[in-house]
Amino acid sequence: MPILKHTHQLERIGKRPRHINEGMWRCWHPDCTFKIPAAEVEGKRSQCGCGNDFIIDSGAKQRKRPKCINCRGTKEGKQHRRIVDILEEVLEVSE
Ligand SMILES: [Zn+2]
Ligand SMILES: [Zn+2]
């Protein structure tokens, strides 16, 4: 019997395969038995641990359990934090 409609929470099953398109992915929702071949997981909607929906892209797929853009340590995010650090330093010095 299908469970309530939900956004699948996709993760890779087992160890990291030799090739990213090998193996299977599944939904880790306790009542869901959804499985999908790794080759087809890109472009699918998934739900992050934080509750946000997102589309799995080639970058997200590298992780066992992909995260949404807000939870990923993106280049832009790191750069932003660095700028904040520098600003805080400058402010401390000027006080
Ligand atoms: Zn599911
Ligand atoms: Zn998230």
Image (cartoon, rainbow, N blue to C red):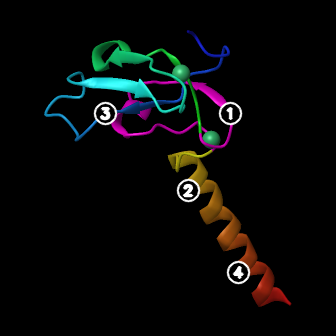
Q: Which residue is mark 3?
A: 13
Disc 2/disc 4 C-alpha distance (Å): 17 Å
The disc at residue 78 is: 2
What is the quadrant of the C terminus in the image?
Answer: bottom right
The disc at residue 52 is: 1
- Which residue in the rendered view is the most extreme toward the right? 95
Disc 1/disc 3 C-alpha distance (Å): 22 Å
Note whether ligand 2 is within 8 Å of mark 1. yes
Disc 2/disc 1 C-alpha distance (Å): 20 Å
Front: mark 2 or 4: 2
- Mark 2: which amino acid? Lys
Highlighted range, magenta: 49-70
Please determine whether, in this image, residue 69 is positioned above or below residue 27.
below
Please determine whether, in this image, residue 94 is positioned above or below residue 41.
below
57 within the magenta span: yes
Identify the residue at horizontal 68%, vertical 33% (top origin).
52
The disc at residue 5 is: none
Disc 3/disc 2 C-alpha distance (Å): 30 Å
